[in-house]
Amino acid sequence: MGKVKIKKKETRIDMTAMSDVTVLLLTFFMLTSTFLQKEPVQVITPPSVSEEKVPVANLLSVLVSPEGKVYLEVLGSQDSTDNKRKGSENVRANMLQNMADQYNSLHPGANIKFTPEELTTFSKCNAFGVPITRMKEWLNMPTDQRDKALEAGPGVPIDMNEDPNKPNEFQMWVKAAYNSIDDELQEAVVKGTGIAIKADQTTPYSVVNVVMDNLQTIKMNKFTLMTALKTEEE
């Protein structure tokens, strides 16, 4: 008797449903994730045993490079559909306008003004560190050139003025951030969680001390130092 041949069936798995789920998950993570933005310089913070987390909102970060250059980064309240006014972009734009007003009032003859487009560009910048007199030129550069100019530039001027009643640009920026539209940032500064200094582990203490002296001169006596968690080997 001959063998009965079983007709072979095509093995095929329908992946349509799986593809739909993958696309939905990818879209979800893209819309909800917060991507780390590039900093002007690479800073390796010194280790410590502190496990207190760095705030992700209402924070003025002072970035100090190993060469002693100072950069600033400002974060407002967490952006949401009902609280856009206190979002980071609005806080930064308002801070730049406050800084221009301060500088013009303290330097007779100065007439620093920014267009709405320049304010918008600044509001989207993560960190910055150029003298206010060069800010307009920096904001009108292409993005890639802005990054290079930031790395090669002098940073925010922080040298103390001979006149104690005349703050330097670093102090003016801190005041401009404090006087921004975000009252929650003001509350964080008062509590001591609103200002954080992030310096490289090779940065001399004398350089960091200059930053702290500048803050204390304008009565900003509470701030934190960013560190990395120390391992068991350390």
Image: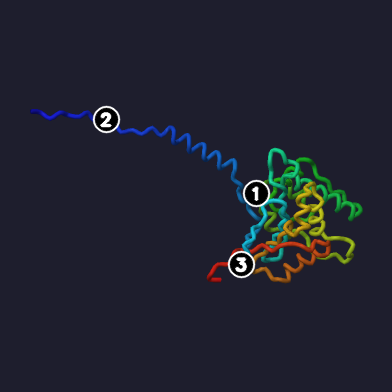
Name the front one of labels 3 and 1: 3
The reply to whether residue 83 is in sight is: yes
- Considering only vertical position in the picture, is 78 above or below 19? below
Q: Residue furthest right?
A: 108
Question: Which residue is under mark 2?
Answer: 9
Q: Nearer the viewer, mark 3 or mark 2?
A: 3
The amino acid at mark 3 is Val
Image x and y of residue 140, in percent: 73, 46
User: Which label's residue is closer to the chain start, 3 or 1?
Assistant: 3
Image quadrant holding the N terminus, namely top left
Residue 144 is labelled as 1
Within 10 angstroms of label 2, few (less than 14), some, or many (20 or more) residues?
few
Under mark 1, the amino acid is Asp
Which residue is under mark 3? 49
Q: Residue 27 placed where, x, y %?
A: 55, 38
Measure how far apart labels 3 and 1 are at the Cα level: 38 Å
Q: In the orientation shown, which residue stands out farthest toward the left?
A: 1
Of mark 2 and mark 1, the one earlier in the sequence is: 2
Callout 3: helix, strand or loop?
loop
- Which residue is more in the foreground, 114 or 206? 206
What's the distance in space between the residues labelled 3 and 2, CA to CA?
Answer: 63 Å
Q: Tell which of 34 and 43 is nearer to you.
A: 34
Position in image of residue 211 (x %, y %): 76, 65
Query: In terms of secondary structure, where does tag 1 sit?
Result: helix
Residue at the image point whose x is 66% and y is 57% from the top: 54
Residue occupying image coordinates x 57% and y 42%:
30
